Every structure is written in structure tokens, then in C-alpha cells.
Amino acid sequence: MKLKDVLTANLVSTTLMTLFSEAVSKADGNTYNEAKILGELLNRITPLNKRQAQIAGWIGHYSVGVVFAGVYAAYLERAKAKPTLVNGLAYGALSGLAGAFIWHATFKAHPNPPGVNLKTYYNQLVLAHIVFGLSAAVVLKKLKNEQ
């Protein structure tokens, strides 16, 4: 898989995942946007001002997306599998569980975490990662068909 394909899948999938999290935030009245929460975590422990921390949160969020898209692409290559909605859904669910574990460890280790309802955050996070996995499958399939 080409790096360009992984970066494209990341850009589309992370954006759609974030839009999903933002929509859930608006509907629920809480903040579930991963980049915003990451920025808030950074703002509370670094000398960065709020704007700088938010920018760093967005950069961090999309950077992690590259890793998640890269792992999915590597799995597909290693398994000699094509991207499908089924394996995209499965990867999204698994990466959502991994993401919830990572966020849980982050919140527990942070000296001053923001007041996020963790149960609802983790639930929406798994769903957001399913959006990510499905999106990545669609993008990678389209890019593969164009080659």
C-alpha cells in the first residue's frame, strides 16, 4: 500500500470520525471531539496557551489517525485481503476498543483531566472508530480500484 493511500484514508476517515464525534457532542451537549479533548489535556499540563494546545490536539489527532490507517493497510497487505465493509467494520470496532483503552489510561494518568463522562465518551468513541474503519475501507478500496 502506498503512503499516499494511507494518508488519504487517514484524512477522510479521521475527518468523518471527528464529524461524527462532533454531531454526537451537539446532540448530547457534551464534548466528545477527540482533538478538542486532547487539546484540553495538553492545555492543562503544558506551557502552551489554549489556542496552541488546541492546534497541537488537532495535529495529534490526525497523527494518530495515520497510525490507525497504516495498521489497517498493513493488515490488509499481510492478509492479502481487500478492503471491505466487513473488515472495515471489524477493524473500526477493534481500534475503537483499543482507543478507549488508550484514552482510559490517559485520563487516569493525567494530573488534572477534564470532566468527561467516561462511559458515554468510550461508547461514542467505539462508534466513531467504526465510522473511521468503514471510511478507511471505502477510501482504500476506491484507491485500489483506480490503480
Image: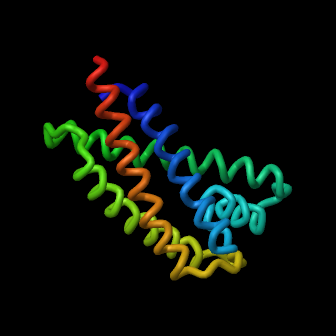
Color scheme of the displayed model: rainbow
Viewer-proximal residue among 27 and 66 = 27
In what quadrant of the picture does the C terminus appear? top left
State left or right for residue 90 relative to residue 46: left
Q: Say which residue appears at 30% left-offset and 39% top-offset.
A: 73
Query: Which residue appears farthest toward the left when viewing the image?
Result: 80
Query: Which residue appears farthest toward the right when viewing the image?
Result: 49
Q: Is residue 145 above or below residue 14?
A: above
Viewer-proximal residue among 43 and 30 = 30
Q: Say which residue appears at 62% left-offset and 59% top-offset.
A: 22
In what quadrant of the picture does the N terminus appear? top left
Viewer-proximal residue among 72 and 112 = 72
From the top left corner, tell me how far across and down residue 136 is, in percent: 38, 42
Q: Say which residue appears at 57% left-offset and 60% top-offset.
A: 21
From the top left corner, tell me how far across and down residue 127 is, in percent: 43, 64
Q: Is residue 107 above or below residue 64?
A: below
State left or right for residue 93 relative to residue 55: left
Viewer-proximal residue among 125 and 66 = 125
From the top left corner, tell me how far across and down residue 107 is, in percent: 59, 75
Query: Which residue appears farthest toward the top when viewing the image?
Result: 147
Count of numbered circles in the view: 0
Q: Is residue 84 above or below residue 98?
A: above
Quadrant of residue 5 in the image?
top left
Q: Say which residue appears at 71% left-offset and 59% top-offset.
A: 39
From the top left corner, tell me how far across and down residue 9 is, in percent: 42, 37
